[in-house]
Image (cartoon, rainbow, N blue to C red):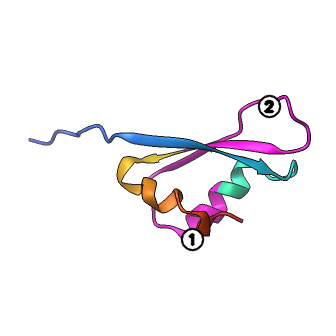
Amino acid sequence: MGHSATKKTKSFLVSRFSPNVTSRDNEESLNEQLKVLSLVCTRPKTKHGTYESFHILVHEEDFPLINNAGVWP
């Protein structure tokens, strides 16, 4: 009898990226560096044209991996 438990997720917002950085750029960079179960990167609309912000969502157990200044350019 298989039952799938819903994994808890955790997220945070990273900011001050160059305007030409995309969600895909961040996903590819993080996935190259880290072995995470699931990673979703979205770009919320901002009122600032000088930089981009990104919302990063991962499984709770992978949060310490992305909440590390060493993985961000």
Disc 1 marks which residue?
33
Residue 46 marker: 2
Q: Is residue 48 magenta?
A: yes
* Quarter of the figure with residue 2: top left
Is residue 1 found left or right of 34 in the rendered image? left
Q: Where is residue 66? Give x, y as percent.
A: 52, 58
- Disc 1 secondary structure class: helix
- The secondary structure type at the circle numbered 2 is loop
Residue 37 within the segment the image draws in magenta: yes
For label 2, the crowd category at 10 Å Cα-Cα, with few meaning under 14, some 14 to 19 and many 20 or more, is few
66 up-or-down from 58: above or below? below
Task: Read off the magenta span.
Answer: 27-56
Disc 1 crowd, CA 10 A, few/some/many (<14, 14-19, 20+): few
Amino acid beneath label 2: Thr
Residue located at (57% from left, 71% from top): 33
The answer to whether 12 appears left or right of 28 in the picture is: left
